Image (tube, helix red, strand yellow):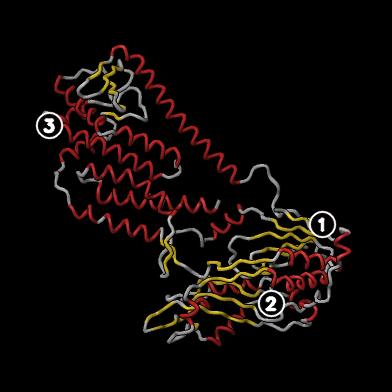
Amino acid sequence: MAIWVDYIWQSIFCSAFLYGIYFIFLRNEKKFSFNRIYLLISPLIALILPLINIPVSFKKPNISLEQTELFRALDNYSAPENSLTTYGLPEVMVQSSKLSMPWTFQDYFFLAYLVIVCLLIFRIFWSFIQMRMIKERGWSFSTYDINQKYFLIPTFGLAPIFSFFNKLFWDDTLTLSQQEEAQILEHELTHIKKGHSYDILFYQFLTTAFWFNPMIFLMQNALIDVHEYQADQAILKKQMNAHAYPKLIAKIALRGLDLSIGNYFTSSTTLKRIKMIKKSGQTKTWKIFIIIPLLLMLMALVSMKTESGQNLLQQNFNLEDIKSKLIASQDSLEIGIKVKKLNAPTHYELIGILEEDKLKAQIGELEYEFSNIQTDEDYIKVRGLIEKLRNSSVITKDYGDLKKISTELDIKAQPEIGLVNWFNSLKEQVVLPKKEENLGLLGGNLVVEFIVSREGRIENPSISRSLGGGLEGQLLDLLLYTELGNWTPAVKNNELVDSFQVIFLNFTEAKDPQEPYHIFRDFELSVLDIENGKNAIDTIE
């Protein structure tokens, strides 16, 4: 779901950018053939550019939603559970942290999309049915021009004059002079010869499939205008009483039936057509050539992706090793455990907060959910189990050349307030969780790595070693949203550069480090118990 929302946003952005180019530079120019081609390929460019991925090593603006809270929320909501293992007593087993619902948000969203698509398709088919009815009514009175290769079909006043492929529907109830008839006929023949009906059907498909993109509708209207400008231009080139032609446009009003698939003589705004007729034919060439750098700029903005430390170089977990450790813990723990696989986790590990009787802990690309934690002793043992599981699921991240560059700096990055003051300020502002402190679970270092950008801001912080109890959330908020995130950037060869930092934070010593971290060190797995089915783990593929 999150990926689709991001794609839709980027395609709408591209469409708006491309339509903006047309509106500012091309809309009032009389390069109608060029404008037509531009409006036909623009929606395709807008749909394709977000799918292209060009990795680059330098920093650049990014319009993607991937780093936003909205994307993370949607990704977490829509991500499959990917359950690898469930373990525990039946009465405390938790199969899923989400309520089982017959319909999810994605289902309703997709249903709404399909309903609107079906309505739009019905509208198109209804237009075809109406046109067929008009055609059948006037078919016996129709004529075929061998030279111009088109059918002339009377509408008997049921529809205004319009054309569709090689069929010209003519309102024979209009009172027109011979000159006016010739001008309108030439106008509609231009639509037929230039194949404007193909353009109309192409945009009917786009507006049906991508009805949520308002820019597509604006482009469609602009293309219809261009069609009319081209047809009007054909009249003026043939000098068919050109000075009276604008009066003819103003004279005839759209009457009767309006079919979404036809080319109408009066479909565009009358005033716009008259203004374009009277406009000088001189085109400013620079407006045409400026499109190329603007398109390249759009491609760089959307398709080029900066390689950062968020790329996972290696993801590895040993499910059998994890199973054995979970089974071994059953002798002293009556808890439920669920394990699921995460997609591209931000942190190496992250121990959550004990809420009621549940605790979540992410280690590598696996997330464990422990339930039925009733006592402090249970909590200490669970934390000990987490320590045992640390080496069973490991990820490493690829920072490209950033780590190497960070060891060859002329001037290293430093907090603006100084490193000592920075550490002291962190410790002063972080509130130690009472439960974990009293139980001696805050021993060792909390390790966080991040990038100090050349602008002097902390970016992409990632917890390398977690202590739990909510410490990590406090730390990340301080690094990202307070003055502690302001650093003096590193310097290399007299240029400001990005640099990689690893920070070790020691808040307190564990009261009894042997208790939480090594409580399972002497457990031996009983082969007999496993064979007898005493400790069973169900694996869900």
Give the residue type that dot 1 points to. Val
Count neighbours of disc 2 (C-alpha within 10 A) and say few if under 14, some if 14 to 19, many if 20 or more: some
Residue at the disc numbered 3: 238
- Mark 2: which amino acid? Leu
Extreme residue in the top direction:
140
Left or right of residue 459: residue 330: right
Viewed as shown, does residue 59 lie left or right of 80? left
Residue 416 visible, this orientation: no
Near mark 3 (Cα within 10 A), the count class, few <14, some 14-19 or many ≥20, is few
Structural distance between the alpha carbons of marks 2 and 3: 86 Å
Which residue is at 17% across, 33% downward?
A: 234
| Quarter of the view holding residue 513 | bottom right
- Estimate the x, y position of residue 401 in percent, counting from the top left: 47, 76
Give the percent coordinates (x, y) of residue 21.
Answer: 30, 52
Which element is circle 1 on?
helix
Q: Which residue is mark 2?
A: 432
Q: Do the residues under discs 2 and 3 have CB atoms within 8 angstroms?
A: no
Residue occupying image coordinates x 27% and y 23%? 168
Q: Residue at x 29, y 21 (%)?
A: 169
